[in-house]
Image: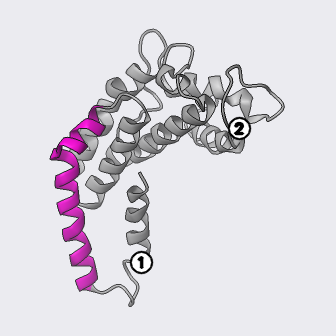
Amino acid sequence: RHLSNLVDGLALIAGSPAWSAADSTAMTGWLTTYYEWVTTSKNGREEAAAENNHGSWYDVQVVALALHLGRVADAKNIVAQATTKRIQRQIEPDGRQPLELARTKSLDYSCFNLEALVRLARLGESVDVDLWKFSTADGRNLRAALRLVAPYADPAKKWPKEDIKATDRARILPLLVEALRHGSDV
């Protein structure tokens, strides 16, 4: 999942004299080969099909790489499919994420998946796909999931499930800030 951060780093060093044209060409070649592998290999296809945070983070990684490699149509297609493939399947109308709630660190994994979905929504802005506006008829959407976890940003509020390890609840705050960039109904 962290490979998507590499793309940001490459943009930052692109104009540096320490990063040569040969470095850029070699990195693009490697990323192209990796992109082909991650989108066609058995491992990659399994992660793409995962219905929990694995699938969400796969989408983030592949969309970031596709955008970096100029495969805008691929990126747009993946983000557009996230409406049904991720949001509709992963989020209940009341905001619960059942596959993440089934984990022994349910708040952590609920936040973890939301971090991926919010990042995917941010990437979607680059290809004119607004995941913030998507909602199913019964109310499955990013905001519902955020509304469910938002009260637990307060460490004094007890999470309703037993978790084997406490979660850094401050992780919820940047998700809410990002949601507020797209409307005030969190």
Determine the main secondary structure of the stretch shown in magenta. helix
Query: Picture coordinates of residue 34 (x, y %)?
Result: 22, 59
- Residue at 22%, 68% in the rendered image: 30
Disc 2 secondary structure class:
loop
Q: Are marks 2 and 1 in contact (CB under 8 Å)?
A: no
Q: Is residue 137 visible?
A: yes
Can you name the residue that lies furthest to the bottom here? 17
Query: Picture coordinates of residue 8 (x, y %)?
Result: 42, 64
Residue 74: name its quadrant: top left
Magenta stretch: residue 37 in it?
Answer: yes
Q: Is residue 61 above or below residue 137?
A: below
Q: Callout 2 environment at 10 Å: few (<14), some (14 to 19), or many (20+)?
A: few
- Residue at 68%, 24% in the rendered image: 162
Q: Would you say 151 lies left or right of 12 here?
A: right
**Distance CA(mark 2)–CA(mark 1):** 37 Å
Q: Which residues are magenta?
A: 21-49
Q: Which residue is mark 2?
A: 166
Disc 1 secondary structure class:
helix
Nearer the observer, 86 or 55: 55
Q: Would you say 108 lies left or right of 4 here?
A: right
Query: Picture coordinates of residue 113 (x, y %)?
Result: 49, 36
Give the residue type at disc 1. Answer: Ile
Give the residue type at disc 2. Answer: Ala
Q: Would you say 103 lies left or right of 9 here?
A: right
- Residue at 71%, 19% in the rendered image: 160
Q: Callout 1 environment at 10 Å: few (<14), some (14 to 19), or many (20+)?
A: few
Magenta stretch: residue 7 in it?
Answer: no
- Residue at 42%, 25% in the rendered image: 87
Q: Which residue is mark 1?
A: 13
